[in-house]
């Protein structure tokens, strides 16, 4: 990771830290806020059986625990379901999906702390990507926020209460104890992360070459029991081969070995399982990892109803009403236009009636004159008729 990205990341965390502190000051419950902690957890990737996870912010409250991941990077595409996201930089660097990454943090936290999944709410804050955040993620009790309305969203979410209360101080103390137990520093965490990424890349390349598929058999939270002694766990080790006449460059090889190897009480004879271009990968692919959810017997996670969910529902309903009202107003406008045109027709018809009426009166008068003229003529004609008889 280059310096610019590190500086920008730290700026983002400072920005969120200030907002988070303001939000928490408005709450009427006790809370503990911890920033940038490194928690070790069991993993097949760990040289000594564990690797580490970085928690940007962890908030302990009497109702829930919040795990917050802050990203101050611009992604060209952050499809929630894609395992890798692409940065908007000149190299189109690929990085881990922040939502999956924070979900792993939650699993690690719940597993190490022995806390039920539904008591932990995850939040991913993508400061440079307001346009892409609309939908819910596939994980229960997980929220993605942008910079827009960040304080309000955090305020409503952190206002959520639950009838099953947590011991805020006790949970905070246990977490700090776990963090301080191995005392992983930022530098150590980065080194562990880089080594893990290297092993993952090596596995991906070897499998892709041999089987033409993109596939990594182990998640970072997996462990693999040794099928020889049944006691130890398999772990990734690495060995550096110095450059030779033939191979000018140093090369690093990765292999899995049992943690009981060299232990005089167990003396495991498990051979090494290589992940190498020129070695058979059959044995490697037959290894059965034990996932974190199985080790913890986690079932389906219950979804909590938060104040933020309620606020969003109210907002949705009010938006719907505003839209309906607009439609009503438009219909009224249309109707008043057609009413006006009917009124115009009516006025024209009335004017025509008046016209016809006066025409009628004139005709009547004319008719009368004609009748009188005829009757007079009749008289004359009569007389004439009588006279001619
Ligand atoms: Zn063994």
Image: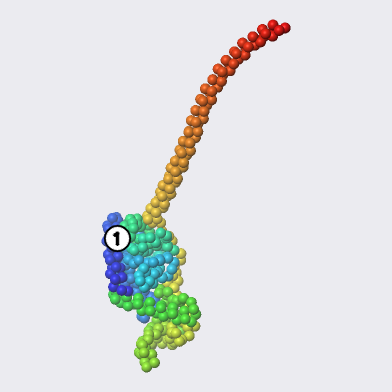
Secondary structure, mark 1, is: helix
Whether the residue under disc 1 has CB within 8 Å of ligand 1 = no
Q: Residue 202, can we see it? A: yes
Q: Is residue 330 above or below residue 12?
A: above
Q: For the point 28% across and 66% down, which residue is it? A: 11
> Within the image, what quadrant is residue 328 found in?
top left
Q: For the point 54% across and 20% down, which residue is it? A: 362
Q: State the quadrant of the C terminus.
A: top right
Q: Is residue 49 above or below residue 151?
A: below
Q: Nearer the viewer, residue 276 or 355?
A: 355
Q: For the point 42% across and 74% down, which residue is it? A: 219
Q: Is residue 311 above or below residue 232?
A: above
Percent across and percent down for residue 215 are 46, 76
* Residue, disc 1: 20
Q: How is the image coloured?
A: rainbow
Q: Residue 183, can we see it? A: no
Percent across and percent down for residue 183 are 29, 75
Residues packed near mark 1 inside 10 Å, few (<14), some (14 to 19) or many (20 plus)? some
> Within the image, what quadrant is residue 168 found in?
bottom left
Percent across and percent down for residue 176 are 30, 69
Q: Is residue 152 left or right of residue 205?
A: left
Q: State the quadrant of the N terminus.
A: bottom left
Percent across and percent down for residue 259 are 39, 83
Q: For the point 40% across and 83% down, which residue is it? A: 254
Counting the numbered discs, the total is 1
């Amino acid at each position: 990771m280059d310096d610019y990205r590190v500086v920008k990341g730290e700026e983002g965390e400072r920005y969120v830290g200030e907002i988070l502190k303001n939000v928490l000051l408005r709450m009427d419950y006790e809370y503990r806020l911890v920033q940038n902690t490194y928690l070790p957890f069991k993993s097949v990737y760990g040289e000594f059986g564990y690797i580490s996870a970085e928690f940007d912010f962890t908030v302990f409250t009497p109702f829930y625990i919040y795990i917050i991941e802050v990203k101050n990077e611009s992604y060209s595409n952050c499809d929630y379901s894609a395992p890798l996201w692409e940065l908007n930089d000149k190299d189109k660097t690929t990085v881990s999906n922040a939502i999956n990454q924070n979900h792993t943090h939650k699993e690690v936290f719940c597993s190490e702390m022995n806390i039920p999944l539904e008591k932990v709410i995850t939040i991913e804050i993508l400061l440079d990507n307001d346009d892409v955040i609309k939908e819910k993620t596939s994980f229960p009790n997980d929220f993605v926020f942008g910079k827009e309305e960040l304080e309000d969203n955090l305020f409503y979410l952190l206002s959520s209460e639950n009838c099953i209360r947590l011991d805020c101080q006790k949970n905070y103390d246990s977490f700090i104890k776990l963090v301080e137990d191995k005392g992983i520093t930022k530098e150590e965490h980065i080194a562990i992360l880089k080594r893990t990424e290297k092993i993952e890349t090596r596995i991906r390349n070897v499998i892709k070459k041999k089987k033409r598929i993109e596939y990594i058999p182990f998640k970072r939270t997996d462990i693999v029991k040794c099928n020889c002694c049944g006691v130890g766990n398999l772990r990734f080790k690495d060995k550096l081969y110095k450059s030779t006449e033939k191979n000018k460059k140093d090369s690093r090889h990765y292999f899995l070995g049992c943690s009981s190897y060299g232990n005089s009480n167990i003396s495991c004879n498990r051979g090494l399982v290589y992940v190498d271009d020129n070695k058979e990968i059959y044995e490697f692919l037959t290894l059965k990892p034990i996932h974190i959810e199985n080790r913890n017997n986690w079932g389906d996670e219950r979804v909590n109803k938060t104040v933020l969910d309620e606020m969003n529902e109210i907002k949705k309903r009010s938006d719907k009403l505003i839209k309906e009202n607009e439609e009503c107003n438009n219909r009224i406008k249309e109707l008043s236009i057609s009413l006006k045109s009917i009124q115009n027709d009516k006025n024209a018809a009335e004017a025509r009636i008046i016209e016809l009426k006066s025409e009628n009166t004139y005709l009547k008068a004319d008719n009368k004159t004609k009748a009188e003229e005829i009757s007079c003529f009749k008289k004359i004609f009569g007389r004439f008729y009588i006279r001619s008889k």
